[in-house]
Amino acid sequence: MKIGIYGGSFNPPHEGHLAAARAAVAALGLDRLVFVPAGDPPHKELALGSPTPEKRLEMTAIAADQLLLHKVTRVWDVELQREGKSYTSDTLAVAAERWPGDELWLLVGTDMFLTLHTWHEPERILKLAGICAFARSAGDDRACLEEQKAFLEERYGARVEFIDIPGRVEISSTRLREGLARGERNGRLPPAVYGYILREKLYGTNADLHCLTMEELRCVSWSMVKAKRLAHIRGTEETAAGLALRWGADEGQARRAAILHDCTKYWSMEEHIAACDRYHEPLDELERSAEKLLHAKSGAALARHWFGQERAVADAIRYHTTARAGMSLLEKVLYMADYIEPNREFPEVDQLRALAFEDLDRAVALGAWVSIQEMEERNRIVHRNTLEAYTYYSRGKWK
């Protein structure tokens, strides 16, 4: 396999890092790309007030996930587990032991490449891995790069590849941190990374989760889920907004409910149950054993108690999976939006999409019926709320 090792302080990880990673995977044909946050960087001190190594690792994992290259990308804590300076030569030696016989490539920016011969044990680095250098700005001097390449090849027998990233803009981590401390949102941060920063109050941010703007709420919610889920969440939000407009529900509430409806989707059973118990969210016997049902209950608890949302929003999240008899308008809007958003594909979806804008109650009835049939085909227990919703809204229409 070809394995890229991409080290850095990632303080914070930004779009420049992701652009370089995408380019390296494509240009080198990497089978695996491993992000390695530095524990104690040898070239520079971490800025005062930087997050803990563990939080930088979490941010890096969130950023890497945004690439949607799940079979390729990894985040490795090897330097965080090692005491002392995070020397690249030591990391590559461990990598060579971990992936024996594989072809290692070290990814570096231009400034690092031009000073590589001054690093700790450069001969060991260049023996263990090829060097993939990418331009950090349009002004990088190609002649200097070629001169350094020739020097490293002659002195160390280095393998060197260059990657050009057309149109890439220089991104200063220092300026990003300074802007965050001033309360600025910089578009150079992946939204999910920005959301994590707000959620954890990093870099001098001090966001009140009860008072987030709509965009901040999106970012924080997105930081809590896998990137592959974001298309569904965005689709649910826009569909909920459209249904709210059609039926006279509060569009803002519909959007906020949709943004948060899956925010605990990737929690463990233990996390779901702990949150429900803490916030006095009742769980029946079936819900305590079914993760698909639990995320609606824990999500409702967080919407109400973490994010300070209105009870109507929390209720919509609470019943977006099962539905129930006697739903509020907002509850029906979110239930159907989650069911029919543009990324959904199943036999009845087109009928449901049309019906949701023609007769919302009949759409809820059909949605409940489809859920009942699916659960019965899988020999799974149907939640009583779904059965009652079908009875309440169908009056026998979908038998």
Image (tube, rainbow, N blue to C red):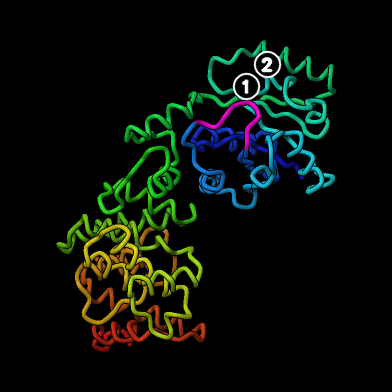
Main SS, magenta residues: loop
Amino acid type, mark 2: Leu
- Examine the rendered structure and indicate whether residue 93 appears above or below residue 227: above
Query: Mark 2 touching mark 1, by CB under 8 A?
Result: yes
Q: Position of residue 66 (x, y in %)?
A: 51, 46
Residue 83 included in the magenta stretch of the image: no
Q: Nearer the viewer, residue 178 or 236?
A: 178
Amino acid type, mark 1: Thr
Left or right, 100 with respect to 202, comes to: right
Residue 257 tag number? none
Q: Toward which corner of the image does residue 205 lie, by quadrant?
A: top left
Q: Earlier in the sequence, mark 2 or mark 1?
A: 1
The residue carrying mark 2 is 145
- Examine the rendered structure and indicate whether residue 64 appears above or below residue 324: above
- Examine the rendered structure and indicate whether residue 231 appears above or below residue 388: above
Q: Which residues are magenta?
A: 40-47
- Examine the rendered structure and indicate whether residue 61 appears above or below residue 114: below
Q: Nearer the viewer, residue 189 or 51?
A: 51
Q: Position of residue 99 (x, y in %)?
A: 79, 47
Q: Residue at x 45, y 73 (%)?
A: 292
Where is the C terminus found, in terms of image quarters? bottom left
Q: Residue at x 22, y 71 (%)?
A: 360
Q: Nearer the viewer, residue 288 or 28?
A: 288
Where is the N terminus found, in terms of image quarters? top right
Left or right, 145 with respect to 299, comes to: right
Left or right, 372 with respect to 161, comes to: left
How far is mark 2 from mark 1, CA to CA?
Answer: 8 Å
Residue 43 included in the magenta stretch of the image: yes
Q: Estimate how packed mark 1 is, as few (under 14), some (14 to 19) or many (20 or more) residues with alpha carbons within 10 Å.
A: many
The residue carrying mark 1 is 110
Indicate the secondary structure of the residue bearing disc 1.
helix
- Name, please, the residue furthest toward the left: 248
